[in-house]
Image (tube, helix red, strand yellow):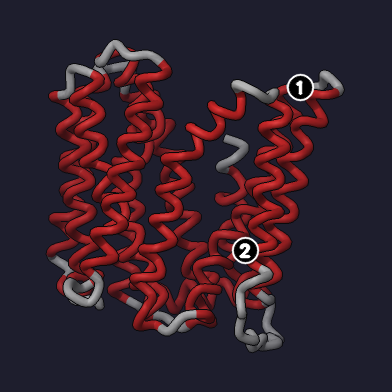
Amino acid sequence: MFAYLPAVIFGLFAGVITDRYDRFKILVLSNLAQAIMVAGIPFLIAYDNTNVWLICVFAFIKSCFNTFFQPALNSFIPQVFNKNYMAKVNAIIATSGQLAWLLGPFFAGSILTVLSLSNLFLIDSISFLISIGILLCVSKPQQVLVKSKVTKWNDLKEGLFLLKNQKSIFSLITLTFVNNLFIMGPAIVGIPILVKDILNGDAIDFAYIEGCMAAGALIGSIIVSQLQGKVKNGALWISGILFDGLTMSILFWSKSVETGMLMLFLHGVGIPFIMVSRTSIIQTHTSNNYHGRFFSFVHLGVVGTTAISSGLVGIVLAFMTVDKLFLFIGIGGAFCGVLALLFTTIKNLK
């Protein structure tokens, strides 16, 4: 909960800051602050002060800086690359993310066999510093900063007004929020319960299943990059929403860890279709001066609906088994894709 809260509290404000100030500096400072926060956890362990509330505070502060990082990154990319390459660049970034998702647990588990948990957190902290070093190698263009006389609140209202008038983008983001209400909670809360209660698996089986989903997402990123220029981004996004829901619903028929691994691999393939195409659409069809605010709207919606969806899953599972939950939420998620087909303006977005 503490990790979700910053996006809910500061999400929109982060977009205004991103549009007003140097995005490159925000990326560097965000990494530096997160490195310090993560390094603080071994400090607590060393002094035997691992109070859960202190850990919550560290998680909250770290997430605050990550809330500024996400819109700054997505807004910085169009400053560096031509709009014609946005989709391919986003596909490459998504691929690197899926690789990290796939290999991260493997490296963490391997390191823990030879080093302590404290040292693992220190290595994690150093990874943020390495990220800063790589950022400093980027040949960045000069960002033109407009000194606004209006308040940050007025900047926020201007961004919301522009979003409202961008009918296709507004519809896309709204459907994203609705789809996430169906999908995100079950994906985060439901899958571990499915593995334990229905598939009779353990923690290792859960790790295998998560790895298969990440591997599917990696394959999906490669497929999306190959489809750029051949299929419109709007069509890719709609197909991703449909596929996302349908592959979630078939988990109802999963009765073994092996079938669960296969089904979640297929589910993972559809994830980049949604994320890469959505990011590319916003970057291409809106002014870079507003990208920070637009991407903060997306980040707030995704994190906010994830929090709500996770809570709802806990309530719903008091009345039905988790396999039936996946059937119904999968159908609901796929319905969002069917609904999106009615918006021709979304389907035709390049």
Instruction: Identify the residue shown where x is 68% and y is 66%.
Output: 26
Residue 235, numbered circle: none
Kind of element beneath mark 1: loop
- Which one is in front, 305 or 242? 242
Is there CB contact under 8 Å for labels 2 and 1?
A: no
Quarter of the C terminus within the rendering? bottom left
Would residue 297 appear left or right of 148 to someone viewing this image?
left
Instruction: Identify the residue shown where x is 34% and y is 71%.
Output: 87
The residue that disc 1 covers is: 50
Instruction: Identify the residue shown where x is 20% and y is 73%.
Output: 232
Q: Quadrant of residue 281?
A: bottom left
Work out whether 64 lies above or below 45. below
N-terminal-most mark, 2 or 1? 2
- Which one is in front, 284 or 312? 284
Q: Position of residue 250 (x, y in %)?
A: 15, 32
Would residue 307 appear left or right of 336 to someone viewing this image?
right
Q: Position of residue 1 (x, y in %)?
A: 57, 35
The residue that disc 2 covers is: 13
Inter-mark Cα distance, 2 to 1: 32 Å
